[in-house]
Amino acid sequence: MNQKGFANIIPILLVVVLAGVVGYLILVKKSADQATPNGQNDSENQIVEKTALLSFTEFFCYLTEQSSPFAYFQFAYQDNGEIKYVRTKTTCDDLIKIGASNKASENSTLFGEKIKLEYSGGKPVKIIRENGSSYQIESSEKIRSFFVSKINVYYHLEYFRNLRPDEVTNECLLIRDNAQHDACLSYQAAFQEDVGICSKMNIASNQDLCRQWVNNIKQGS
C-alpha cells in the first residue's frame, strides 16, 4: 500500500521540479533582457580597439560663394575583411587649437594609429584617438573606397608617419577586396622599402608595379 502511494507521488514531484526549472529559466532570461535594454546584445554596445589603416584631417576654413567652411577628422580601418571609414565633425577653431595646417609636413597623415570605437546598437558612435581626444562620429558616413581623400603618397612619403607597420600590414592582409588589399599593402611595401610585401599581393600586375616602386625609392628616383 505504501509502495503504491509512493508511486503516485513521483509524478507529482516531477511536475513540481519541472515547473521550478522552467520558472528559473524564465527569471534568468528576464534578468538578461534587463541588462541589455531594448533587446540589444552586449556585442552591439561595446568599445573596440582598432589599428587604423589611415588617419587624416580634411578641412576648408573659408566661406566662399561656392562652399562653406568644414573640418573633419577621418579614419579608415579594417573590419571583418572590409575597409570602413568614419568621419568626425569638428570646427576650424578646434583645428587652430591643435595647430592643424594645410602644409602636409606640419599636419602629417598617420598610418597605424591606435583608436577606440564606441558602439551603440551595432554602429560606431564615438571615437577615441591615441592622444586621448574623443569625437562623435557622423551617423551618415558610409563605407567607401580606400584613400578617397586622394592622398598621393606615392610622391610624398616623407609627409606621412607610419606607426606600427607590422600591425598595419597584418590588417591589410585581412582585406577581402583584391584591389583594396593590394593598395593597402603597396603603401606598407613603400614605407618599409620591402619588396617581400609586394609578393603578398593578390594581383600579379600589382606585384610588379609594387616592386618597381620600392626599387625606385631605394635608388632615390
Image: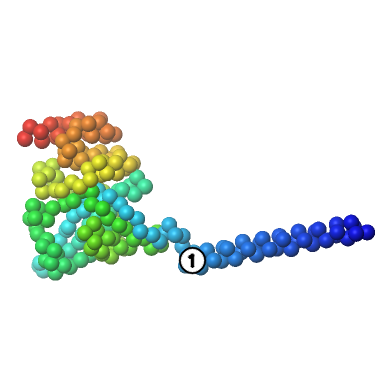
Q: Say whether residue 21 is left or right of residue 130.
A: right
Please report the residue visible at 24 percent of the width from the left and 54 percent of the height from the top: 75
Q: Nearer the viewer, residue 68 or 14?
A: 14
Mark 1, Cα crowd under 10 Å, few <14 / some 14-19 / many 20+, is: few
Q: Which residue is at the far front?
A: 2
Query: Is residue 196 in sight in this rendering?
Result: yes
* Vertical placement of residue 99 versus 147, above or below: below
Tell me the SS state at disc 1. helix
Q: In the rendering, at what x and y percent does residue 100 appear? A: 12, 61
Which image quarter is the N terminus in?
bottom right
Q: Amino acid at mark 1?
A: Ala
Mark 1 = which residue? Answer: 35
Q: In the rendering, at what x and y percent does residue 8 appear? A: 85, 60
* Vertical placement of residue 196 versus 160, above or below: above
Q: Say whether residue 196 is left or right of residue 32.
A: left
Query: Is residue 87 in sight in this rendering?
Result: no
The image's colour scheme reads rainbow
Q: Which residue is at the far left?
A: 221
Please report the residue visible at 27 percent of the width from the left and 55 percent of the height from the top: 115
Please report the residue visible at 30 percent of the width from the left and 52 percent of the height from the top: 50
Q: How many marks overall?
A: 1
Q: Nearer the viewer, residue 27 or 205?
A: 27
Which image quarter is the C terminus in?
top left
Q: Which residue is at the far right?
A: 1
Q: In the rendering, at what x and y percent does residue 85 appear? A: 27, 54
Q: Say whether residue 129 is left or right of residue 161.
A: right
Q: Say whether residue 144 is left or right of residue 192.
A: right
Please report the residue visible at 17 percent of the width from the left and 57 percent of the height from the top: 57
Q: In the rendering, at what x and y percent does residue 110 appear? A: 18, 51
Task: Indicate the quadrant where residue 165 lies.
Answer: top left
Q: Nearer the viewer, residue 17 or 174?
A: 17
